[in-house]
Image (spheres, grey):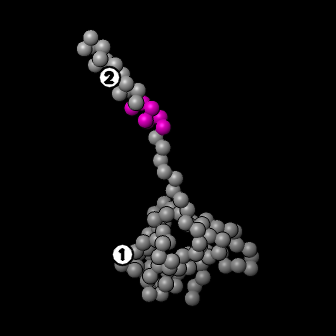
């Protein structure tokens, strides 16, 4: 009798483990939408943009960015932008628009 209870318990435990692994559902990473500005003083605008910095030199993306405008506008010199395996997406620029980089 005790053997049947132990066997049933471990069988149920094994079944639950298999079902849990089979349906390992992960949360969807949302995409932030808009234009991000890295200002000349080192601040990031808007404040909820998925970019962090500790030293105002290295900026790291913490999420995906989608933009139908400029994507990321950098107004500060001498920075490092770490993509951290994130994605920036937007519309394809026309021949009369700036594409990716402008010196100034």
User: SS at mark 2?
Assistant: helix
Q: How many residues crowd mark 2 within 10 Å: few (<14), some (14–19), many (20+)? A: few
Front-lying residue, 80 or 69: 69
User: SS at mark 1?
Assistant: loop
Residue most toward the right? Answer: 95
Mark closer to the chain start, 1 or 2: 2
Residue 96 on the magenta span: no
Main SS, magenta residues: helix
Q: Is residue 56 above or below residue 23?
A: below
Residue found 44% across the figure and 82% down from its top: 43
Residue 84 appears in which quarter of the rendering?
Answer: bottom left
List the residue tagged with mark 1.
54
Residue 95 appears in which quarter of the rendering?
Answer: bottom right
User: Residue 67: x, y in percent?
Assistant: 62, 70
Front-lying residue, 3 or 36: 3
List the residue tagged with mark 2.
9
Residue found 50% across the figure and 79% down from its top: 45
Residue found 74% across the figure and 79% down from its top: 96
User: Residue 75: x, y in percent?
Assistant: 52, 85
Q: Is residue 53 above or below residue 25?
A: below
User: Residue 81: x, y in percent?
Assistant: 47, 73
Q: Distance of mark 1 from mark 2, alpha carbons?
A: 51 Å
Q: Is residue 84 above or below residue 41?
A: above
> Is residue 43 left or right of 9 when viewed as pictured?
right
Question: Which segment is the magenta one?
Answer: 17-23
């Amino acid at each position: 009798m005790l053997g049947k209870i132990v066997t049933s318990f471990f069988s149920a435990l094994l079944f639950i483990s298999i079902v849990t692994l089979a349906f390992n559902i992960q949360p969807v990473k949302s995409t932030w939408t808009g234009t991000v500005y890295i200002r000349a003083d080192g601040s990031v605008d808007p404040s909820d943009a998925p970019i962090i910095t500790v030293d105002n030199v290295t900026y790291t993306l913490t999420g995906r960015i989608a933009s139908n405008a400029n994507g990321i506008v950098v107004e500060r010199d001498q920075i490092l932008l770490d993509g951290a395996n994130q994605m920036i997406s937007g519309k394809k620029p026309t021949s009369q628009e700036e594409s990716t980089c402008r010196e100034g």
